[in-house]
Amino acid sequence: MSRITNYLTGAFLLFLLLSCTNDSSDKTGKTDSLNQLKEELHLEKFSNVNIAKNVEVNWNNALQAENKDVAIVEFDAKEKFPSKIQSSFLKAEMNYQLISIESEGELKNYFIEVFSYNDSEAYSKTITKLDKFRGVFNVFSLNGQNLGSIAIDHGNAKNISESKTLDFLAETINSFDVSPNITKKIPLCDKTYTQVVEQSEDRYRVVSVGGKILSVEYMDTVVTRTTTILPYPCDGSGDKEAIILQRIAHYYTGDGKSYAGVSGLLDVVITDPSFSNNPCLVAVFTKLGGSPTFQTYLKKFDGNFSVANLKLSSSNTISSGVNAETSPPSNYLIEISFNSNNLNRPGLDVARTFMHEIIHAEMFRKLLSLSSTKGEIDLTKLNQMLTQNNFPGLYDYYTRYGINGMQHEQMAAHYQETMISFLKNYDPTLTAAQYEAISWAGLKGTSSWNALTQAKKTSLTDIYNSWLASANKQCQ
């Protein structure tokens, strides 16, 4: 028997929420109901981070409807920074909505993320008029729990996640379906889609001494276009944990500073189209956003507070034996260029390359802070600073190995634990021996490597090669 019956009970408090009345006590009740709804909605708790950081509800505009014993109030929600989807089967725009349904004295609230098929008319911003709509609703509780997905085919709703918590919503939608066709088929959720976010940012260089600002110089305006591959919005058809991890990878927060989505993460650096249009590099970089170690290094290049900007690019002309190159500072810019021909590797190995090159960039940034002349490292100044200003560690490596040779030597001697911690954070499924072996990749031939016994070097090499041969080569 349907849970939607002909029995009309209660006073439909939510439906009356915004109704016209002159009774002061009723106005108070409506205000209390609206305030309670606001208090129960916690967007910041959503595992879908685009909703958590980039969506807000318009409380001043509500749609009301009733059918049989059901009263519905719907609030529109929008993105603060509009995002788009690049897909062969989904429309570019997404919609969001807060829905409250009262039936038989029971109130149920849902927050939905709406995806529309390309052959569908635009979403009408109400679940009561879906006869010309085809798409998928991702459904959440008000505290962010992902309840699953409902597919809509011209007004007919199907609970594709087979979650009992969604039966009521599906039945409510179907109560408005007047189509006689009951043989429609809902497509399976077995694809991915691509979400693109564009943002522009004016960049300024601020020079300050002792907290006093000496100058503010406009540098440029950067338009960031970020692309992320996401699972098709039908959580019930796939690995929910994997989907949640992919969604969490959109965000990155450190030391109280929030970066909303991939675009926020990439705002810290400058990206060349060769990088931002490369699915492998963007996917790995997106996941790296969850690594505290990576965040710590990346934030040192954050806008006004850095002596240098960081640029990411890719190239197909780099030597085949080199995974990436980090260029010395030039006009306050340090560039990391990835070899696009060397990306047929496990995601963790590509991530290791990211971290390896970020450490290179940080070393160049530190040297530039000691010896900058028009945004380049001045070797004369560097010698003076290292000898006169008590930097014994840097001075030792500089005098022994030179400005180019010193970096790998420093990494091998002092950054092994940093790299191992980073690898564990990116992928916690490996053994301690595997993390150690991977951390040495790119550092063989250094003094620290040569100081190991031959047995140890052979063991590390064999462990790394064995892992590399057996791991999934798909960069993700």
Image (cartoon, rainbow, N blue to C red):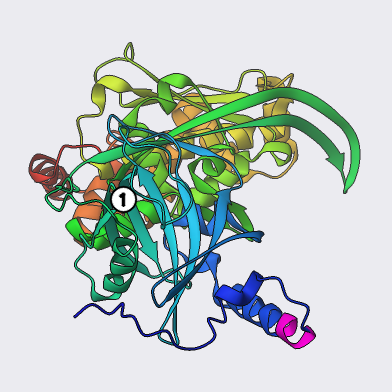
Q: Residue 133 lies in what quarter of the image? A: top left
Q: Nearer the viewer, residue 347 or 36?
A: 36
First to last magenta residue range = 24-28
Residue occupying the point 61% across, 47% down: 80
Q: On the picture, is 292 further left or further right than 426?
A: right
> Helix, strand, or loop for circle 1?
strand
Residue occupying the point 61% across, 43% down: 300
Quadrant where the C terminus lies?
top left
Q: Residues within 10 Å of mark 1 (few under 14, many from 20)?
A: many
Q: Nearer the viewer, residue 34 or 39?
A: 34
- Residue 216 horizontal/vertical position (percent): 85, 31
Q: On the picture, is 274 further left or further right than 364?
A: left
Secondary structure mostly seen in magenta is helix
Vertical placement of residue 378 versus 250, above or below:
above
Quadrant where the N terminus lies?
bottom left
Vertical placement of residue 182 versus 34, above or below:
above
Say whether residue 451 is visible.
no
| Mark 1 lies on residue | 136
Whether 407 is among the magenta residues is no
- Residue 87 horizontal/vertical position (percent): 32, 32
Q: Name the residue type under label 1.
A: Val
Q: Nearer the viewer, residue 404 or 62?
A: 62
